Image: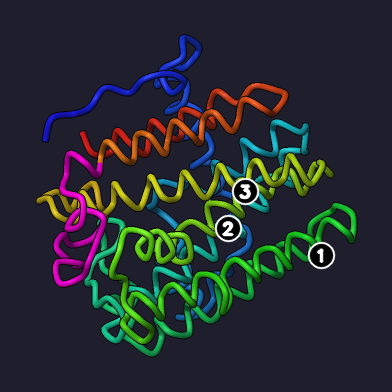
């Protein structure tokens, strides 16, 4: 597949990939340290939790929390703790997603999936433990009660029966399977987009920003999540498990953006969606360069 050129505003003159990767690498280290502090190490369950959440992953959701918080002068400790909570939720979803009764993936983030390393029952309980831990982290944040409540409620809505879990039900065929591009967008929004959306909105919640600013970041996160999932579909159809972090071909029997659109049309569509996401950010005050770079990062995974 020929790489399509990325047009403005993604390649605006103030965008620098080196700066983005440096900031992302610094955040990965900081989030790892924060996660190590909140996960005990006494029991087998704790070891399984650490296996699932530490030492891997792009931390893009955590990056969205960090960068949206930076826009509104939120203190670094608050941003890092919220980012850690997001990573706990994401790790919980992956531990369950990889189970034989779900997607049946034996590797994740370049190492054995939780159920391969610790057994199926422990993997189930690992996810069961990481989810509540995320809410505990949010409940203990040193911010206003209104902010804590907003974060807890918004995250619960994102991952509950109208969000991530609903998307998983559809993906497993327990609800009507996607038949059209619009159906796939709905599935993607529920299974992937809502957590990106919450991560981007979290900084605005912590910063006590207006409903309009929260909505802008929420919409940006949904768009970025769609770009990320579309490129994931593209990578799943390739022979590049290292970039995908799990075995390729997992979705060969399903309708995906790749099977519906083909590689070139998929990448073109993802690029247009990414450009729209960047345009949304232009309504915000402050430096949104690195949030725009996150879009280019998601797209360039396909190169």
Identify residue for label 3.
218
Q: Is residue 8 left or right of residue 32?
A: left
Q: CA distance from mark 1 to mark 2?
A: 15 Å
Residue located at (79% from left, 63% from top): 140
Mark 1 or mark 2, whichever is nearer to me: 1
- Under circle 1, the secondary element is helix
Q: Quadrant of the N terminus?
A: top left
Q: Which residues are magenta?
A: 246-266
- Where does residue 165 sit, x and y in percent of width and height? 49, 76
Which quadrant of the view contains residue 259? bottom left
Q: Is residue 88 left or right of residue 179?
A: right
* Vertical comparison of 183 with 11: above or below: below
- Where does residue 133 sit, x and y in percent of width and height? 63, 71
Image colouring: rainbow
Most extreme residue toward the bottom is 121
Disc 1 + disc 3, Cβ < 8 Å? no
Q: Which mark is residue 149?
A: 1
Decide: few, some or many residues near mark 3? Use Cα within 10 Å; few <14, some 14-19, many ≥20: many
Most extreme residue toward the top is 13
Identify residue for label 2.
86
* Vertical comparison of 47 with 146: above or below: below
């Amino acid at each position: 597949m020929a790489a399509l050129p990325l047009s403005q505003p993604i390649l605006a003159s103030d965008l620098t990939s080196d700066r983005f990767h440096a900031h992302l690498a610094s955040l990965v280290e900081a989030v790892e340290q924060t996660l190590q502090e909140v996960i005990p190490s006494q029991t087998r369950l704790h070891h399984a939790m650490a296996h699932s959440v530490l030492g891997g992953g792009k931390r893009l959701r955590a990056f969205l929390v960090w960068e949206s918080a930076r826009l509104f002068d939120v203190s670094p400790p608050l941003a890092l703790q919220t980012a850690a909570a997001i990573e706990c939720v994401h790790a919980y979803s992956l531990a369950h997603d990889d189970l034989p009764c779900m997607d049946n993936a034996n590797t994740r983030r370049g190492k054995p999936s939780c159920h391969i390393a610790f057994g199926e029952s422990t993997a189930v309980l690992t996810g069961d433990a990481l989810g509540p831990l995320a809410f505990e982290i949010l409940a203990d944040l040193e911010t206003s009660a209104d902010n804590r409540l907003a974060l807890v409620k918004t995250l619960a809505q994102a991952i509950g029966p109208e969000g991530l879990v609903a998307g998983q039900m559809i993906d497993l065929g327990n609800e009507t399977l996607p038949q059209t591009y619009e159906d796939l967008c709905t599935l993607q929004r529920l299974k992937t987009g809502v957590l990106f959306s919450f991560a981007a909105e979290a900084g605005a919640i912590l910063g006590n920003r207006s409903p309009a600013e929260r909505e802008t970041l929420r919409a940006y996160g949904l768009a970025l999540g769609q770009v990320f999932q579309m490129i994931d579909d593209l990578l799943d159809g390739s022979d590049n498990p290292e970039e995908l972090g799990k075995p390729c071909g997992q979705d060969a029997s399903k309708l995906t953006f790749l099977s519906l659109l083909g590689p070139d049309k998929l990448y073109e569509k993802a690029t247009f969606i990414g450009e729209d996401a960047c345009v949304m950010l232009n309504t915000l005050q402050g430096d949104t360069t690195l949030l725009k770079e996150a879009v280019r990062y998601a797209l360039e995974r396909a190169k």
